[in-house]
Amino acid sequence: MAGGRSPITCHVLDSSCGRPGRNVPVKLEQLNPAANNVWTSVAYGLTDADGRVGNLLDPSHQLVAGIYRMTFQTAEYWAANGVKGFYPYVQIIFEVAPGAESQHYHIPLLLSPYSYTTYRGS
């Protein structure tokens, strides 16, 4: 991976206050169609002071084509900040297409207590 970065990164921004979502637990899994579509754990991380997980995977990790799921444990984040949120976790499911395994995938999450949004980042 060029630049020595994880092939998959993420970023959480608390849009209700305009600050990074710090200390949000993040889990990355891959769908395994050969095993009755069971999700297999790939990596785990915690967002840093800037709301990012930049080291989710080793930079040398080679992605394989398939369906991935990133789960953000938002209930823990809201509880730590004294807020009652509606979504206890947010799952973003995305695909690494055949032939696109060497691309970088950045998964941003814009979060508030009663809504969230995401997009393909760069």
Image (cartoon, rainbow, N blue to C red):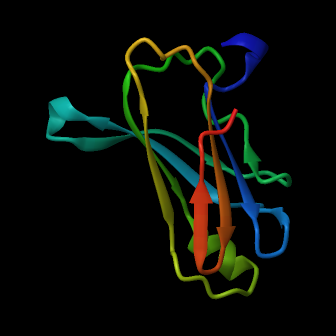
Q: Quadrant of residue 21?
A: bottom right
Residue at 85% x, 55% y: name it. 49
Picture layout, residue 65 above or below residue 121:
above
On the image, the x and y values in percent for residue 38 come to 24, 43
Relative horizontal placement of residue 88, taking residue 66 as reference (left or right): right
Residue at 59% x, 60% y: name it. 117
The mark tally for this picture is 0
Picture layout, residue 39 above or below residue 76:
above
Picture layout, residue 18 above or below residue 52:
below
Picture layout, residue 118 above or below residue 64:
below
Relative horizontal placement of residue 56, taking residue 19 as reference (left or right): left
Quarter of the image where the N terminus is located:
top right
Residue at 78% x, 15% y: name it. 3
Foreground of the two, 122 or 51 = 122
Foreground of the two, 101 or 122 = 122
Foreground of the two, 99 or 21 = 99
Relative horizontal placement of residue 27, taking residue 78 as reference (left or right): left
On the image, the x and y values in percent for residue 13 come to 75, 60
Quarter of the image where the C terminus is located:
top right
On the image, the x and y values in percent for residue 20 come to 81, 60
On the image, the x and y values in percent for residue 82 come to 74, 87
